Image (spheres, coloured by chain):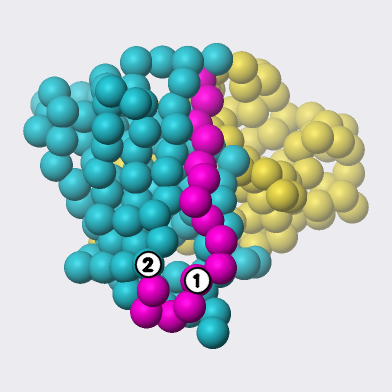
Chain colours: A cyan, B yellow
Amino acid sequence: EVQLVESGGGLAQPGRSLRLSCTASGFTFGDYAVSWVRQAPGKGLEWVGFIRSKAYTGTTDSAASVRGRFTISRDDSKSIAYLQMNSLKTEDTAVYYCTRGRRIKVAQEVMYYFDYWGQGTLVTVSS
Amino acid sequence: EIVMTQSPATLSVSPGERATLSCRASQSVSSNLAWLQQKPGQAPRLLIYGASTRATGIPARFSGSGSGTEFTLTISTLQSEDFAVYYCQQYNNWPPWTFGQGTRVEIK
C-alpha cells in the first residue's frame, strides 16, 4: 500500500525556519517525483514545490510565492523528501501535503500528475 | 499561468441524484486534467486523471469528460460518502500546477 506521511509541522514565529519531512512506503521512492501542495485554513489548494526523481535529473521547481525561501530535497536511501522553509511569513500558515508525482509522456511532452497524497501536517506562523 | 475556474461554488443534491460539476481552463490543457475529492479533515484523493480515467479503486459512478478548456465531473448516483469538496487540477502547463477553487457538494 502506498503511504506518504508528513511530519515536522508546528508553530513558528515569522522569520524563523521549519523543515517538513515526507516519509514514503509501499513503493520504490526513488522512481518517483515528489510535490508539495499547501492549503491555508478554509481555502483551496496551492502548489508549492516539486522535485524530480534522480533518473530525471533530480532538479526542483518552486512556486513564485515561496521561491528563494523554500527548498525541496530528497534522500532516496531513506525514502524521505524534505521541505525546508526559511523566512516564514504569516501567509505560509497552511496544511502542507506531500504528493507522489507520476511521470507520463503525452505526445512527446512530459507531464506529472499527483496520484497519492499524504495526510498533511499543519504549519502555523504566528508571533 | 493557467487559471482554473470551477462552477458552481456549491451544489445541493439529494442522495441518489446525479451531480454535474464544471471546470474551465483559461487556455487549452488538452486532456491533462485531474479531479480530486476532499472530505472534511482529510487529504485530497485523486479521482480522475487524463480528464476521464478513473484512478485505482474509484467507483464507476464517478466519470469525467471534456478536453481543451471545458471539463465535467459527473457523479451518477450520489452516495452519502460523496458529499465533499471537489477540485480540478491541470498538469499540462507546468510549473506551476494549478487548481480550481473547488465545488462543495452538499446534501439538499
Q: Is B62 on the left or on the right of B36, as rendered?
A: right
Q: Residue at x 32, y 74 (%)?
A: A87
- Dividing the picture into quadrants, the one containing residue A52 is top left
Does label 1 lie on the same chain as label 2?
yes
Q: Is residue B34 left or right of residue A57?
A: right
* B88 inside magenta stretch: no
Residue at image mark 2? A17
**Residue extending farthest bottom:** A127
Counting from the top left corner in percent of width and height, residue A13 is at 48, 78
Name the quadrant of the C terminus of chain A.
bottom right
Q: Is residue B9 left or right of residue B24?
A: right
Asked whether B65 or B93 is in front, the reply is B93
Does label 2 or label 1 sit earlier along the sequence? 1
Judging by the rendered image, the residue that carries numbered circle 1 is A12
Q: Amino acid at mark 1?
A: Ala
Q: Is residue A54 above or below residue A42?
A: above
Tell me which chain the residue with mark 2 is part of.
Answer: A
Residue B38 in view (yes/no):
yes
Q: Residue at x 86, y 36 (%)?
A: B80
Assess whether residue A13 is covered by the magenta stretch: yes
